[in-house]
Amino acid sequence: MSSSLSIRLADPDASAYIPLPELSARLGIPLYDPGEPCDFLLFYQQGSLCLRQMSDTTVGAVRVDFDNEALYYRQRRQTQPEALLKAAGIKNGQGIHAVDATAGLGLDAFLLASAGCQVTLFERSPILHALLEDGLRRALQSAEERVRDAAMRMHLVQADSVDAIASVTPAPELIYLDPMFPERRKSAKVKKHMLLLQQLLHGQGGDRETELLAVALASAHKRVVVKRPRLAEPLAGRRPSHQLEGKSSRFDVYVVPASTP
Ligand SMILES: C[S@@+](CC[C@H](N)C(=O)[O-])C[C@H]1O[C@@H](n2cnc3c(N)ncnc32)[C@H](O)[C@@H]1O
């Protein structure tokens, strides 16, 4: 996290799941002081942990919500999630262990888990990890069985994937990478959320992309899938085995050769 960003913690409607002093100590984020302006506010609202950028009120608060209609629609429609699952080579994910090495808000990981995969999510930002943890807690209590089932297949770890992937045993069939890419200012809500994340995470030292791809290729059993903007160069300049293009993004697929016994 950039040291120039100030983040404060608040609970305007006293709905904190984790007591604020405990969360404050865990994340190293001071409690909100109305006399002191801040760049980001992390707060509980109606029992959900939310993040808001104080300088841009058009974006709205970000929270991890696996139990929403838009995500359910994404799960069923024929384009983006299909492209991710197609790139991942997954029809029925049962028995497949996937690693999402750049978990973010967990949307892609949820799509993989909804397809039946067991998914280990690595997220190195303590704030994103706290949002994800909170979203998973609520998903496990969802009234929808499909949401609870998917959440039960998701295992969240706070770690830098470059250091953590090699310790995953047995080796995952699939490793998925979606490193942060400079977003162009667009109106779609999801883009605005990504822009907010980009500003929050700016200066945290880059995504170690070259190392990330190298360690993923060395660790995945079958394939590595990298999400890229449609016109971007392949990650670390490394040519994929093949590509799948969507409307605004592209999936670069690296098929890992079977190791000889
Ligand atoms: C573009 S977002 C991923 C969005 C995600 N695919 C989703 O569906 O919400 C990238 C995330 O990867 C995380 N990240 C980047 N490099 C990482 C690394 N080396 N290890 C763990 N997390 C990393 C960032 O903190 C950020 O939250």
Image (tube, rainbow, N blue to C red):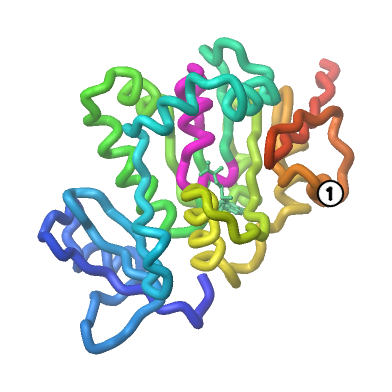
Image-based side of 81 in relation to 253, left or right: left
Residue placed most toward the observer, 20 or 56 = 56
Of all residues shown, which one is farthest toward the front? Answer: 187
Q: Position of residue 178 (x, y in %)?
A: 63, 44
* Image quarter in which the C terminus is found: top right
Image-based side of 228 in relation to 183, left or right: right
Q: What's the residue at 50%, 39% (across, down)?
A: 121
Of all residues shown, which one is farthest toward the left? Answer: 14
Residue placed most toward the observer, 38 or 214 = 38
Bounds of the magenta span?
Answer: 101-119
The image quadrant of residue 155 is: top left
Q: Position of residue 82 (x, y in %)?
A: 61, 22
Residue of label 1? 233
Is 103 in the magenta? Answer: yes
Is 1 in the magenta? Answer: no
Q: Position of residue 46 (x, y in %)?
A: 17, 50
Q: Amino acid at mark 1?
A: Glu
The image quadrant of residue 55 is: bottom left
